[in-house]
Image (spheres, grey):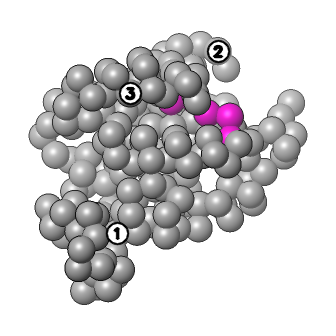
Amino acid sequence: MMTDADRTVLLAMDFQNGIAGDEAFAATGVLERARDAVATAREHDIPVVWVRVALREGQPELAATASFARIAAHGDVDETHASTSIHETLGRRQGEPIVTKRRISAFTGSDLDVLLRGYGASSLIVAGVATSGVVLSTVRQAADLDFELTVLSDACADRDEEVHRVLTEKVFPKQATVLSVDEWAAGL
């Protein structure tokens, strides 16, 4: 039995309409694999935390020279816009928290650290789009915060398949266990 000191939490990151709904991501099957990961987490009483990127109306968080401004310019990322809602394929349930971040990492500009402390989390299961964006930034920060990490390689995707491969096969294994959704589920 898990104690509060060794709780695992699944982070489902940037699976929002304006990002995960993009044809390039939809074609990878990442939404279906992430949906399977969410279902597995629920079956094993692992809390699911949804992470989205959204900015206040008028985007006052953005500095004129911020590199993040390029990403924000790709679509409407206002908090109330449909593009920032969790993609319906994943079936978010009432009561599952949504963390709103203001930059690329799930920790930046959000209350994720407070929520994870509330859960007593020491282990994170990571899924998200894009592998070279939210997944990379969050894995690096979570490792620095001493979380035990598992990256679900097929519940992550990137517009560049080679970048995804290099990150999941060479970079992430230095700080995380990298498994497919099926491998992770079989080990529970």
Q: In the figure, is residue 16 to the left or right of 118?
A: left
Spatial CA distance of label 3 from label 1 is 25 Å
Q: Amino acid at mark 1?
A: Ala
Residue found at x 26% / y 35%: 158
Mark before the other along the chain sequence, 3 or 1 = 1
Residue 67 place in picture, x, y as percent: 26, 63
**Which mark lies nearer to you, 2 or 1?**
1
Task: Say which of 119 and 114 sits in front.
Answer: 114
Which range is magenta?
A: 147-151
Amino acid at circle 3: Leu
Residue at 45% x, 26% y: name it: 171
As drawn, 32 above or below 135: above
Q: Residue 73 — which label?
A: none
Q: In this view of the protein, which residue sits in the foreground, 87 or 55?
A: 55
Q: CA distance from mark 2 to mark 1?
A: 34 Å
* Residue 163 drawn above or below residue 23: above
**The disc label shown at residue 187, or none:** 2
- Residue 1 spot, x, y in % from top left: 86, 30
Residue where numbered disc 3 is placed? 167
N-terminal label among 2 and 1: 1
Q: Residues within 10 Å of mark 3 (few under 14, many from 20)?
A: some
Residue that numbered label 1 is attached to: 54
Cα gap from disc 3 to disc 2, whole angstroms? 23 Å
Q: Amino acid at mark 2?
A: Gly
Asked if the residues shown at circle 3 and circle 1 are in contact, with their CB atoms under 8 angstroms apart, the answer is no
Q: Residue 43: name its quadrant.
A: top right
Q: Secondary structure at mark 1?
A: loop
